[in-house]
Image (tube, rainbow, N blue to C red):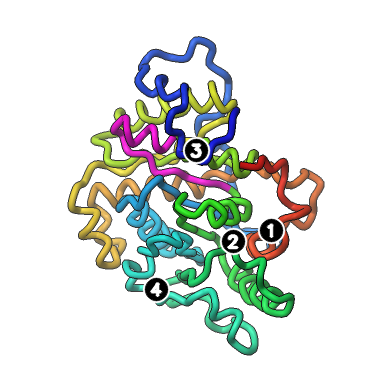
């Protein structure tokens, strides 16, 4: 696989996105997450961290993360949301029910972050006022203070949701090395699927053993979503030799995405097609668990999100492939 910094432009394997026939020699790779998990997380086990990406700032990405956080919080989970799109921080503008705290707050404040970890809604939103890739320039004391404060947030969280874009490669690379898995929002037009595949390829170039899945967006029904997943799965298996996971889809709802951004959707208002899709995606995530590829099976103290994000990358990244 020849690395490229472009989002797949000019790659030979794009032609397979136009092919609807099954793969000649399909591999027995998993289609869907299958391992069930207990609702109660062991104290020493870090919370699951998921990064949601798209090749551009799709409305569906913000919509999914916002309402997925709300759905998880309604089920009793505490959710930490990181608005990691350094180019267009949309979540800080759209999540009116969760006040955003800038990352620098945890460096400049005195004392710890205890007592105010999560809002009453069960969601805590962290915004980025710095490029994550520049945190290596922090002094030792500032770095330690930042990591310890963020660890408190992590310890009181059941799930970490982050958004990111490929606009700043070093920033994206830093974030991907800290999360358990990446989910790419994949629209159905061929041109958009090409960009989504290019982003998936870029993700694997940055962190070889990360778990990657897709959420199909702007589709009419489950059949169309299934066709999108099968096409993407075939080329990812064939050219990247990696499994791809199906986390569900967001139906083609047009302006409803914009309308639902602007208010908190309560449990009694969950009859819309959009929220029904989010509920199904939430259920898929709850009933699945990521592969622990970057830690050995015998590791008793796996590194958490904060430790991987704010400490030196040497020593904990597994099989990194330079761009």
Q: Estimate the spatial distance between the alpha carbons at disc 4 and disc 2, rounded to whole Å.
A: 26 Å
Mark closest to the chain's N terminus, 4 or 2:
4
- Image quadrant for the N terminus? top right
- Where's residue 118, x and y in %? 50, 75
Mark closest to the chain's N terminus, 1 or 4:
1
- Where's residue 272, x and y in %? 23, 51
Q: Residue at x 56, y 66 (%)?
A: 157
- Where's residue 53, x and y in %? 44, 49
Q: Check the image and name the residue furthest to the right.
A: 298
259 to the left or right of 112: left
262 to the left or right of 289: left
Q: Estimate the spatial distance between the alpha carbons at disc 3 and disc 1, rounded to whole Å.
A: 27 Å
Disc on res. 98 = 4
Q: Residues within 10 Å of mark 3 (few under 14, many from 20)?
A: many
Check disc 3 and report the residue beneath it: 200
Q: Estimate the spatial distance between the alpha carbons at disc 3 and disc 4, rounded to whole Å.
A: 30 Å
Mark closest to the chain's N terminus, 1 or 2:
1
* Closer-to-camera residue (99/194): 194
Q: Secondary structure at mark 1?
A: loop
Q: Check the image and name the residue furthest to the left.
A: 255
- Vertical arrangement, residue 97 with respect to residue 55, above or below: below
Magenta range: 181-197
- Vertical arrangement, residue 151 with respect to residue 234, above or below: below
Disc on res. 133 = 2
Q: Estimate the spatial distance between the alpha carbons at disc 3 and disc 2, rounded to whole Å.
A: 20 Å
Q: Nearer the viewer, mark 1 or mark 2?
A: 2
Q: Nearer the viewer, mark 4 or mark 2?
A: 2
Disc on res. 112 = none
């Amino acid at each position: 696989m020849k690395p490229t910094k472009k989002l797949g432009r000019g790659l030979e394997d794009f032609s397979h996105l136009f092919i609807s026939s099954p793969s000649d020699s399909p591999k027995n790779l998993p289609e869907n997450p299958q391992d069930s998990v207990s609702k109660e997380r062991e104290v020493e086990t870090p919370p699951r961290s998921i990064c949601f990406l798209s090749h551009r700032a799709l409305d569906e990405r913000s919509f999914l993360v916002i309402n997925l956080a709300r759905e998880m919080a309604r089920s009793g989970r505490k959710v930490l949301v990181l608005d990691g799109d350094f180019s267009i921080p949309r979540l800080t503008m759209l999540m009116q029910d969760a006040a955003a705290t800038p990352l620098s707050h945890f460096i400049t404040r005195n004392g710890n972050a205890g007592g105010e970890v999560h809002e009453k809604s069960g969601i805590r939103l962290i915004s980025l006022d710095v490029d994550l890739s520049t945190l290596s320039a922090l002094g030792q004391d500032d770095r330690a203070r930042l990591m310890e404060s963020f660890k408190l947030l992590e310890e009181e969280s059941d799930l970490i949701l982050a958004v990111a874009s490929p606009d700043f490669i070093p920033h994206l690379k830093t974030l991907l090395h800290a999360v358990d898995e990446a989910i790419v929002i994949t629209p159905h037009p061929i041109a958009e699927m090409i960009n989504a595949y290019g982003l998936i390829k870029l993700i694997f170039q940055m962190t070889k053993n990360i778990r990657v899945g897709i959420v199909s967006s702007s589709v009419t029904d489950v059949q169309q979503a299934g066709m999108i997943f099968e096409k993407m799965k075939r080329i990812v298996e064939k050219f990247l030799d990696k499994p791809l996971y199906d986390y569900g889809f967001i139906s083609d709802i047009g302006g409803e995405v914009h309308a639902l951004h602007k208010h908190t959707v309560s449990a009694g208002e969950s009859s819309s097609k959009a929220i029904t899709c989010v509920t199904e995606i939430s259920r898929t995530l709850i009933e699945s668990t990521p592969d622990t590829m970057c830690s050995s099976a015998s590791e008793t103290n796996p590194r958490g999100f904060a430790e991987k994000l704010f400490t030196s990358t040497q020593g904990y990244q597994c099989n990194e492939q330079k761009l």
